[in-house]
Image: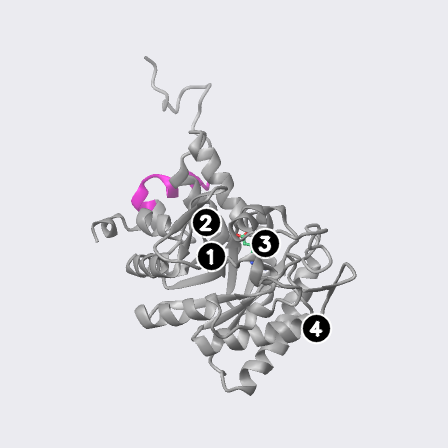
Amino acid sequence: MKSMTNSTDPIAPTLPLTHRPRRLRRTETLRRMVREHTLRVEDLIYPLFVMEGDNQKVEVSSMPGCYRYTLDLLLTEVRDAYTLGIGAIALFPLIADAQKDNAGTESYNPDGLIPRAVRAIKQAIPEILVITDVALDPYSSEGHDGIVEQGKILNDETVAVLAKQAIAHAIAGADFVAPSDMMDGRIGAIRQALDAVGWINVGILAYSAKYASAYYGPFRDALDSAPKFGDKKTYQMDAANAREAIKEVDLDIAEGADIIMVKPALAYLDIICQIKQHTHLPIAAYNVSGEYAMIKAAAANGWIDEKKVILETLTSMKRAGADLILTYFAKDVALILHPSKMLL
Ligand code: PBG
């Protein structure tokens, strides 16, 4: 057979190329050396659902592999995550309908589910960073992130409740509060409220560019928190907007945000990239429930290689500029990156 590399072959002459980018892709060792971005376990924040009761974990049907945990079992899950090298968790509560009202009163109950969970985690695994979500939707009889009056979401009245919620979480021991509500002025109000009671070291992870997204569907199943009427478009952002994200980021920085978040992540990589050019604050990307569900569903059908798609997807977020990634895949990633931890 004729050699394929015969440079004298008139049909396949050696091209006079100055650059051959493929030289840098020749071996895995070389590829690793010139790799520009790396996904690390240290980058991950693990979102977890907590519910009342004892010794139960209930799988979220649209999020296979994700569970709502009672507090006792949550502690085991958090300990496992920490052992795998995951440094932070984000907590979300399932609240009974009987405890929900329009003003989200339960959200600032100092003995509510989240404050109890934070105290228990901080006692059992003090090293792990605990981030709490600040928003009314899990506590709202209307399923909205704010107080509803005549079909409208009130802004300033809601912010006052969010500040109380943040204080309740801080007193319980939260390291960061993460306002996910998208009310105007809430970062400043929460910063002032925390500082006024001396919680100057509690940080704010601001959901700055949070879009009105259909990718949140499975999360709302998990918490039974879907809006009872309408949608969230009067407070969450329009998917078509990019400059507006920069405006939201500027406001949150001016008001005292410590970390900026973009949410969802995958359909908004351009937003992450633009914000990265714009600020020196750390940027978090939220690999949301719908992104998780799509990978799980395709993998369950045998249509994609789950592990490879998880790594490729999360690496794309790092490449776009995310410093941190909230992901329901956190434990899977830890095990993929460090398989020896499996022995623990
Ligand atoms: C609530 C909140 C939502 C998510 C995080 N916090 C849902 C929403 O805004 O409707 C979504 C997370 C996910 O989909 O994984 N304010």
Q: Between 324 and 344, which is closer to the camera in this rendering?
A: 344
Does the beta carbon at disc 3 come under 8 Å from ligand 1? yes
Residues marked 1 and 2 touching at CB (< 8 Å): yes
The answer to whether any part of residue 98 appears in the image is: yes
Does the beta carbon at disc 4 come under 8 Å from ligand 1? no
Q: Amino acid at mark 4?
A: Glu
- Of labels 4 and 2, earlier in sequence is 4
Circle 3 residues within 10 Å: few <14, some 14–19, many ≥20? many
The quadrant in which the N terminus is found is top left
Q: Which residues are magenta?
A: 17-30
Determine the residue positioned at 47% across, 57% down.
326
Q: Vertically, is 38 above or below 104?
A: above
- Position of residue 216 measured from the top left corner of the image (x, y, whole percent): 58, 49
Q: Amino acid at mark 1?
A: Ile
Query: Mark 3 = which residue?
Result: 225
The answer to whether any part of residue 276 appears in the image is: no
Question: Number of numbered discs present?
Answer: 4
Q: Amino acid at mark 3?
A: Ser
Circle 4 residues within 10 Å: few <14, some 14–19, many ≥20? some
Circle 2 residues within 10 Å: few <14, some 14–19, many ≥20? many
Query: Mark 2 = which residue?
Result: 314
- Of labels 2 and 3, earlier in sequence is 3
Determine the residue positioned at 46% across, 62% down.
91
Query: Mark 1 = which residue?
Result: 325
Determine the residue positioned at 50% across, 42% down.
62
Q: Which mark is residue 157?
A: 4
